[in-house]
Image (cartoon, grey):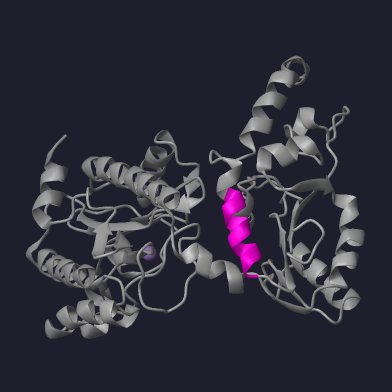
Amino acid sequence: MIVRRKILGVFFLLFFIYSVVSAQGPEYYKKRRDSLLAKLENAAALVPAAWEKDLETFRQSNNFYYLTGVEQPSLLLLLSPAARSPEILFLPARNLAEGNLSEAWTGAKLGPGAETEKKTGVARAVDRSAFEATFAYLAGKIDRLYFDYDPSPLEGPVSAGEVMLKKLRDRYPHLEILPLSRITDSLRTIKDSVEIATLQKAVDITCRSLEETIRALEPGMYEYEVEALIEYGFHRRGSQRPGFSSIVGSGPNSAILHYNSNRRKIEPGELVLMDVGAELDYYTADITRTVPANGKFSDRQREIYQLVLKAQAAAIEAVRPGVAWKEVLQAARKVIEEAGYGEYFIHSIGHYLGMDVHDVGSSQPLEPGMVITVEPGIYLTEESLGVRIEDDVLVTQDGCRVLSASLPKSVEEIEALMRSD
Ligand SMILES: [Mn+2]
């Protein structure tokens, strides 16, 4: 196998070089960097790529991907209108030699130079070793730095981003260092047509996979079997990974909000709650359906289900530009409270959706181009009965569009789907 790989090496190199850059052309990301540069004035933005972790499939950090479309670790993007070159990508030199750190083992990489500049559209692509000197020169001309990093948990090892942050603070005490999210979140909250199309595809993959799983679902299956069917459906339809840990909760587990051990055997007469989302090209869906294990809701299950459905319809009805989140919540809450179940609706109405399942965004009023989830629920722990219904909704100029509208949702639709083979 290893010997063979050497012969095929040339093909691998060509293929991988092509594959580390996104399907969108370089101009697409250039526009985003320009929007960011327009906000910087006397500041700079420093965006590290995600660091590679052992035994984990690499996933680029959202902000780095948002600004470059490049899926490769160990890179740094430096943006500043005050610099001689407003955008510079720092990359390690390519390793074409033999040995287990060479590209024959790791796959081809982008390196410093004109080829990367052409492929990524970033004005300058230089060797990573030039970063220190370049930044030191720039630091004399700016007073603020936006830096992108994830703080590590208190008990975990210090993240590479934190190490870098400390170095920057020690070396450049005059710089005010702020989180990059201060300027990227507002850009990422409003989705453009490419992002909306990608989200729609991720939603469609999720809908079709849920649909075929609901049809196949029956008592006696384990929750993890249901999870596997859903995720197999995701991959078969082109999704790279689930956007978050799939939740499949049956019976008592349907009433646990973030249950995701998915180990229980599904018994007849129970409800099965599935809260899942396929990720496609860094955008994830987030959809919940709750169905009866044996294909028919009991009277009590139907009663609670219809109530949640009514609350969700009221909330979706409220979604349009200018409306506050709390008004959307209130629309659902009113329906559930009037029926006497207010204390069992224990979470909020939804969240922004995008590159993160709980995507960036503030509590500002809704605007066209935002994508949100609408997900009321009622959880009756004593009855082992939990119902949540969640759809993905795009805010439009005059209201909203439910991206996941093609997935059966009414009692009749779900029962009909489970009858068909
Ligand atoms: Mn959600």
- Apparent side of residue 200 relative to residue 12 in the rendered image (left or right): left
Residue at (64%, 31%) from the top-left corner? Answer: 18
Quadrant of the snapshot with the C terminus: top left
Q: Which corner quadrant holds the N terminus? A: top right
Q: Is residue 393 left or right of residue 292?
A: right
User: Going 90% across and 66% down the picture, which residue do you hit?
Assistant: 137
Tell me which segment is drawn in magenta.
29-39
- Quadrant of ligand 1: it is bottom left
- Residue 236 in sight: yes
Tell me the residue at 31%/82% (across/down).
326
Q: Nearer the viewer, residue 345 or 115?
A: 115
In the image, residue 136 above or below residue 111: below
Figure quadrant of residue 71: top right
Quarter of the view holding residue 25: top right
Give how far across and how far down residue 382 sits, in percent. Answer: 24, 76
Report if residue 159 is visible in the image.
no
**Residue 302 image position (x, y, % from top left):** 11, 64
Residue 196: percent from the left, percent from the top?
Answer: 39, 52
The foreground one among 110 and 218 is 110
Residue 236, position as x, y percentages in the image:
41, 34
Taking depth in this image into account, of 73 and 401 the one nearest to the observer is: 401
Q: Is residue 31 magenta?
A: yes
What residue sits 85% from the left and 34% below the top?
95
Residue 348 lies in the magenta stretch: no
- Specify the principal SS of the magenta part: helix
Left or right of residue 106: residue 354: left
Numbered disc total: 0
Query: Height in image: 32 above or below 377?
Result: above
